[in-house]
Amino acid sequence: MPHARLAGLLLPALLQSVRCLALEPPVRPAPPALRRPRPLAMSASGGTGGGDSSSDPERWASLSGSDLSRELARRSTLSSRVRTSAPVRFSLAAAADGRQFLVSFARFWTGLGAAVPVNRLMLALIVAAYGLQGVCGRAMLYAGARMNQAILVGQWHRLITPIWLHGSLMHLASNSYSLWHLGPQAEALFGAERFLLLYVLSGVGGNLLGLWMGAARSMSVGASGAVFGLMGGLAGHALRTYGVAGASQTLSSVSRILLLNLFIGSRRGSGIDNLGHVGGFLAGGALG
């Protein structure tokens, strides 16, 4: 039985090898000696260099905490302290955040204007603002209306905010009807950017005329000045290009809506600011 005799000789040696591998830890190579990083050599002027005694790494390693603080304070300059001060860092961060917000808002407005006409956006804004007036009560009206006394003491936002507010549902319906019919014509003629400028600046022009010639205690709201500015812009452009096809139809449409608004504003006790209408029409005619 040669095979059985050979197995009897090899089996004890195999078991001994397995026992040694299980009990003894594996042999791992020794880690390389850790090397302490060498500090940058600093010259007396604060830059890197090797001509100063401070470039000796042994000297830096032997410094205590207080000595190291004094050494760093000696090398600190006024410009570096100003750059790393909290107000400067806060101002720079706020400026970067503001720039990012303006870029994001410009991209959002560009994309929204490409998807939805600006005149429809203006219509949606005045309707939404009237809905907020119903929720907030008269507080929103008093906060944004054109009050001449408040403007004269520094509340200049009241030259713009009245464009989006309205005093009654009839007032809103009248301006919405005018904007619905005139807005697409004006935007197609002037373009989205010029339409927006014409709309807002005409509203501001109407409020400026009301501020100049109106009573000190007068109060006014409404998009009528902006709408009349669209009429003035369309009428001025039609008069300058009267021989061109479509100019007479534009004048006819503008005249019809203008007469309707003048009739509503001429009624006794209507409470409509005709100075805002005239100012908006003149501003729109000059800009259009």
Image (cartoon, rainbow, N blue to C red):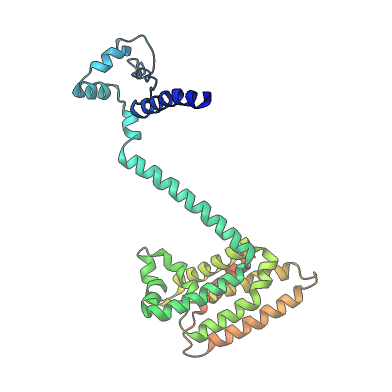
Q: Is residue 127 left or right of residue 230?
A: left
Quick one: which residue is furthest to the front in this view? 1
Q: Residue at x 58, y 83 (%)?
A: 261
**In the image, is residue 181 above or below residue 208?**
below
Quarter of the view holding residue 232: bottom right
Quadrant containing the C terminus in the rendered view:
bottom right
Q: Residue at x 52, y 67 (%)?
A: 205
Q: Nearer the viewer, residue 270 or 227?
A: 227
Q: Is residue 109 left or right of residue 140?
A: right
Residue 108 percent location from the top left of the image? 55, 59
Q: Is residue 52 left or right of residue 174?
A: left
> How many discs appear?
0
Q: Residue at x 72, y 70 (%)?
A: 239
Residue 134 percent location from the top left of the image? 42, 81
Residue 276 percent location from the top left of the image? 51, 75
Q: Nearer the viewer, residue 139 or 217?
A: 139
Quarter of the view holding residue 11: top left
Quick one: which residue is furthest to the bottom in this view? 268
Q: Nearer the viewer, residue 193 or 236?
A: 193
Q: Is residue 164 left or right of residue 28?
A: right
Q: Residue at x 65, y 75 (%)?
A: 182
Residue 80 percent location from the top left of the image? 34, 30
